[in-house]
Each structure stands twice: as C-alpha cells, then as structure tokens.
Image (cartoon, rainbow, N blue to C red):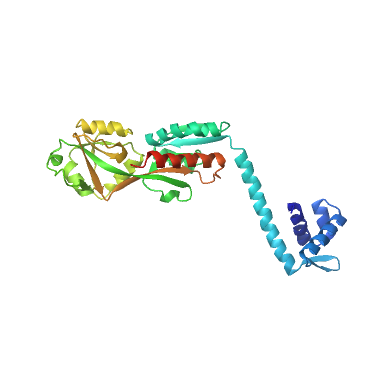
Amino acid sequence: MDKRYLEYILALAETGNMTKAARKLYVSQPTLSQFLAKQESEIGSPLFKRTNGSYALTPVGELYAEYARKVLSLTDILEKDIQRISNTSRIKIGTSASRALQMLTSILVDFCKYYPQVELTLSDGSLQIMSGAISKGEMDVAFVTAPSLDQWKEQSIALKKEEVVFAAPSSHPYCQRLNPDEPHVLNSSQMVTHFGSSPFILQLKGSCIRYLLEDFLADQNFTPVIACNTSNAHSICDMVASNIGSGFIPTGYAIISPKVTCFSLEPKLYRIHSILYRKDLIPGPPHKYLFELAKNYAKEHWENL
C-alpha cells in the first residue's frame, strides 16, 4: 500500500472533516471520499462513523489508525537510515594497539577491493584517546584492546581475549629459586614483595595494560620504580631479557627464552581485542563487511593468543 493512503485516513481522523482533510492533503474531496469508500469495502468494515458531516473513528478505524502511525514511523526511519547508509563515503578508523594495526593492514586489502568508493581515515593512539574519540563521535570505529567492555555493551564487538603475564629477568634472585616443573604464579602482594625493589618497564599511561596494572596493584599502595615507558611489547620483552627491568606483556608477545621468566597473575589479567563504534552509528554494508573481515582475521590468526 502506498503510504500516502495511510496519511489520508490519519488526516481525516485528525480533522474529523472531509473538506478540511482534503485541503490538508492537497487532494480533491471526491478523491478522498472515493479512496475511503474503496478502503472500507476492501476491509469489510467502516473505518469512520459519520454524524452530520463529522467523521469519528470506529473501533476498527482506531486499530487501522494505530497501525498506520506505526507503519509511517517505521517508513520514515527506514528512509533516513537508507539515506545515511547510501551517503557513507568515509569511515574514520582508530587503533590503540600494534596487533590491531597489523590486522587492519591485512584486512583493508580486501575491504578496499570490495568498497573502492569508501574513503578511509586512519589514526592511532592510546585506549584513552580512542575511547574518548568514539564517545565524542569524532571516530566512527576503533580497533582497541580494552580491560573490559562493560561501558561499551551496546557499541562493541569482542574479537579475542588474551592473557597478560608478568615477565621478569631469569637472573632475578626470586626466579633463580623457582622449580621449573611447577607453574609460575604471582598475586599482587607476592609481586610487590619479590620484585618491588626492582625497576619496571611499563606501557604508557592511558593504555589497556597500564589500566590493568593499576587495578591489579590498587590495594598494595605500591609505586613502582620505572626504568622505561613504552607502547611496544617487543621492546619490553627485549629489555626484560637484557635485565633492564620487569614488565607486563600479552601472551602473544611472550618470548621463549632462558633469559625471561613469565608468571601468570592471580587473579588472571586479560585484555580484550575489540571493536568499538560510536553510539549513533547505524552500521551500513561497508561497516558490516569491515567487522566481518576483522572477526574472520581474529579466528584465523589469533587462535593461540
């Protein structure tokens, strides 16, 4: 049914007068009268009760009007959404982790082949910067690692959960006393007791792992001696192996080396590889294709994280 016919019924219901309704709709009175008669004939029940030229909805008419309003509302939303999706010519994408950037470099090859008309704008920064940009609507989509997605429940997609471990130089006195056949586990109190006087190599403030560390040590009243701040996990591994200090690294970057001893933390720490998107974003086909490429990449390449 053409939506304007629904508008005919609603206009007549609102004005209660055939002449006024016809004038409001910019149609002739005979046209409106003929449509009403035809519609009532098809339905098999009168929509209006006529009293001295006044039109009032019957119970069937009330039901018809209720659904007409719903249909018109949904049609309006659909038209606006189609317009927004059709006008998608640029997607602003952010990243907060090197692994996410590596993934994007791979999946954008397929994306650009499939959607050559979509212009992509890429930027990177800490989790704090990316989440802030998403909240303000300055970024459309951000590929990040987050300690939790609780605040992003309605605007996030989890791709992969990855454990974060504590890495210390194997030459450290505590590491020298460990039984190599037993699991290496530390709680926050034990970490401070055994490694608190040694320097730390930490991720930059505002990063996912830095947030995890701050929460992990929240009840210890401990301020670490920092030898270096860096966002590069490979650099942290290398510096730990060189006995510069201890640090926190994702298991995907943990190196198998006699120079580095890794500890699982208690409780365990995890970072979540995720997609965040702005709250008012209505994902169109390009967005959905980008999300699907990311999900497939995570399944294929991050299975052992």
Quadrant (top left, top right, bottom left, bottom right) of the C terminus: top left
Which x, y percent locates residue 24?
A: 80, 53
Which residue is more in the foreground, 111 or 172?
111
The answer to whether residue 52 is left or right of residue 62 is right
Q: Residue 32's image quarter?
A: bottom right
- Looking at the image, residue 142 lies above or below residue 50: above
Q: Quadrant of residue 235?
A: top left
Measured from the top left, where is residue 237 in percent x and y?
A: 26, 33
Residue placed most toward the observer, 104 or 65 = 104
Residue 119 is at least partly visible in this image? no
Quadrant in which the N terminus appears: bottom right
Q: Position of residue 84 (x, y in %)?
A: 61, 41
- Is residue 106 positioned above or below 7 on the image? above
- Give the side of residue 211 with respect to residue 58, left or right: left
Which x, y percent locates residue 287? 53, 40
- The structure residue drawn at horizontal position 51% and vertical position 35%, both measured from the top left corner, is 92
Say above or below: 118 vs 220. Answer: above
Can you see residue 6?
yes
Question: Is 281 on the left-hand or right-hand side of 231?
Answer: right
Residue drawn at (52%, 40%) of the image: 289
Count all numbered tags in the image, as a single digit: 0
Residue farthest toward the right in the current orientation of the protein: 30
Picture residue at 76% right of the left edge, 52% below the top: 4
Residue in view at x 62 percent, y 45 percent? 81
Left or right of 60 in this view: 88: left
